Amino acid sequence: MDAQEFLLSEQWYSDRGIPFRRGYLLYGTPGSGKTSFVYSLAEQLKGELGLNIYVVNLSNKSLTDDTLGELVSETPSRCILLIEDVDAAFVQRVRGESTATNNVTFSGRIDVRVHFGNATRKQAYELFTKFYPTLPDADTERLAAEFASKIPETEFSMAHLQGFLMGHKRNPKAAVDLVSTWVDGHRKDEVPDNSTTNDDIEDIEEVPGTPIENQE
């Protein structure tokens, strides 16, 4: 994992006079699991390396480069700093709300970009199995496969699928039986975004050159 490799390279950075930090930009479809992924990563790294997570929200209009710098300087030297709603800073600029005292930039702070898109059938399958862990294995695999086969590829976010399953959290068979009707209803209500492809978390770890674009 890229984050683990970085955390084990502190001496390498020190020998070359490079600041020991690594910035990741997670971008893509709303509800695709970006924040959940960060918290999952933080939980893993907290157990392995004792890292805690700190959160800064850029939707705060009073935040500037200076205040962001102050917040960053107050965090421990070894931690995960999650900066949420990065797009809020740029939306303010487009609307003309940016001023010399309300201006956050990210020059030199982003090393890696990771794209998150809508859910694949593989992810739909895995989400179903995690939602119903007490089912016998054979039933879980059969129902999960049937559920995933009814989910259009990269048409719905993970948050959408999770919301549907929440409505049937005690009845997996009903979730499988009703999901096609749910899909048809959503297709009538909204125009799906098919312009993005999804890179699931396993691909990020196993094929680091494909979904991750290094900016170094």
Image: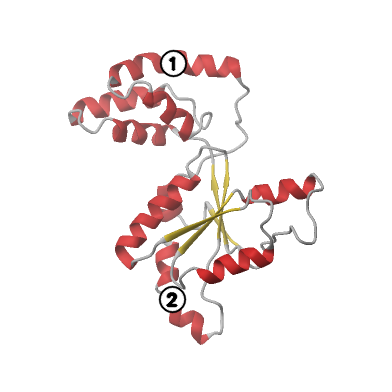
Residue 107 can be seen in this image = no
Task: Identify residue type, mark 1.
Answer: Ser
The image quadrant where one finds the N terminus is bottom left
- Of residues 11 and 149, the one drawn nearer to the viewer in this rendering: 11
Name the residue rendered at 42%, 21% in the picture.
150
Q: Residues within 10 Å of mark 1 (few under 14, many from 20)?
A: some
The image quadrant where one finds the C terminus is bottom right
Question: Which numbered disc covers residue 70?
Answer: none
CB atoms of marks 1 and 2 within 8 Å: no
Task: Identify residue type, mark 2.
Answer: Ser
Q: Secondary structure at mark 2?
A: loop
Q: Is residue 107 left or right of residue 168?
A: right
Q: Distance from label 1 to label 2 (Cα)?
A: 49 Å
- Of residues 55 and 175, the one drawn nearer to the viewer in this rendering: 55
Q: Earlier in the sequence, mark 1 or mark 2?
A: 2
For residue 109, which quarter of the picture?
bottom right
Q: Which residue in the rendered view is the most extreme toward the bottom?
A: 15
By what rule are the colours in the image chosen? Answer: secondary structure
Name the residue rendered at 56%, 80% in the picture.
18
Q: Which residue is mark 2?
A: 9
Q: Is residue 62 above or below residue 150?
A: below
Q: Which residue is mark 1?
A: 180
Residue 124 can be seen in this image = yes
Q: Secondary structure at mark 1?
A: helix
Q: Is residue 104 left or right of residue 137?
A: right
Residue 114: horizontal and vertical position, in percent?
A: 54, 52
Name the residue rendered at 56%, 38% in the picture.
30
Q: Is residue 208 left or right of residue 57?
A: left
Q: Which residue in the rendered view is the most extreme toward the left?
A: 136
